Image (cartoon, grey):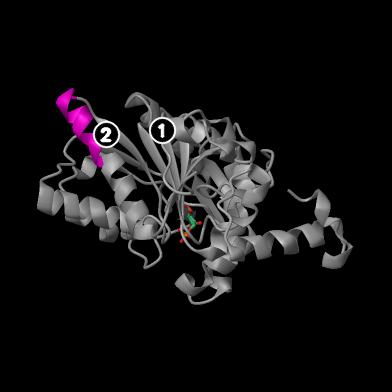
Amino acid sequence: MSNKVLTKEKWEASPFTKKEKIHTQLYETSFSASTAIAVEIADMIREKQSLDEFCVLGLATGSSPKSVYKELVRLHKEEGLSFENVITFNLDEYYPMDPNALQSYVKFMHEQLFDHIDIKPENIHIPEGTLSKTSVGDFCFSYEEEIDKYGGLDIQILGIGRTGHIGFNEPGSSSQSMTRLVNLDSITRMDAASDFFGEENVPIKAITMGVGTIMKARRIIIMAWGETKAGIVAQAIENSPSDNVPASYLQFHPNTSFILDAAAGSELSRRKIPWTLGVIDWNPELTKRAVIWLCETLTKAYFEIDRSRLQ
Ligand code: GLP
């Protein structure tokens, strides 16, 4: 059984589903994974163009989607992909935040994507970091209404924070939550410290689409690259859904895929302990790992194991 890119149908028929509760595709590199995500988005934009409809995209910030945006820009410049029918809604923004500040998600989105494609400025929506406290509630409500007005999100792309957050829905967020003002987790603020030249400068709040807003998207693609994400990704995919890891709520969504590079997928059972899934292409290295795992699991030394029972 290939360890890598399985369509949903093939994945559903695979032994990986003994542990994995969300469709998961493993790519060798973040580059190949990002290209695949960009192709899916481009296909949706073109399909909607052929029907003379808007394509409504939910967009994310952070380092993960940068490579996807780079490929979309390339498709625009070199292959004529037009974004004229595209409406975008960004997931989140720090609060308060000046849109011209170095760390603003408005600036990020313009630099990474919007300034390089033919999207109409009026079709771009990003939560506003300059609102007064008294107007945030109304804004959040109208953000939801605006998404609904365009018929809902066709595709929502997501990264995952080290806390397991999606958007800025930190542990403790409800699965029904809608766009709102939230407090940031200390780990999230620590992770953003270098962007703000010190943790003390990171805002303590943000405006984010809720888990419930995200779950209304017809298609969700969540991406993660690198070893630092491997642990939280495995929890989101393999553990029971819980508010401790908001990304695990995606298990309830019928059309979500986790797209991972090899390092981000390294803590999944299919990679770490494949023998427990019956997916065994034995080689000396795997045999050694399995024996060590068995000794640890049984808390027995190698010579104490009854090897006649091992088949
Ligand atoms: C921020 C964003 C999230 C993003 C996360 C992970 O917290 N609000 O939407 O998923 O960062 O970022 P990165 O992709 O840099 O790991």
- Mark 1 Cα shell of 10 Å, populated few (<14), some (14-19), many (≥20): some
Q: Is residue 237 above or below residue 295?
A: above
Front one among 23 and 305: 305
Residue 288: percent from left, percent from top = 67, 65
Front one among 189 and 156: 156
Residue 257: percent from left, percent from top = 46, 40
- Mark 2 Cα shell of 10 Å, populated few (<14), some (14-19), many (≥20): some
Q: Work out whether residue 151 can be spotted.
A: yes
Which residue sits at x=37%, y=52%? 33
Q: Is mark 1 within 8 Å of ligand 1?
A: no
Q: Is residue 199 left or right of residue 70?
A: right
Tell which circle, 1 or 2, labels the residue nearer the N-terminal end: 2
Residue at numbered disc 2? 44
Residue 62: percent from left, percent from top = 43, 59
Q: Work out whether residue 99 can be spotted.
A: no
C-alpha span from label 1 to label 2: 11 Å
Which residue sits at x=48%, y=57%? 96
**Residues at discs 1 and 2 in contact (Cβ within 8 Å):** yes
Residue at numbered disc 1? 219
Q: Which residues are magenta?
A: 42-52
Residue type (three-letter) at the residue carrying disc 2: Met
Which residue sits at x=29%, y=40%? 41
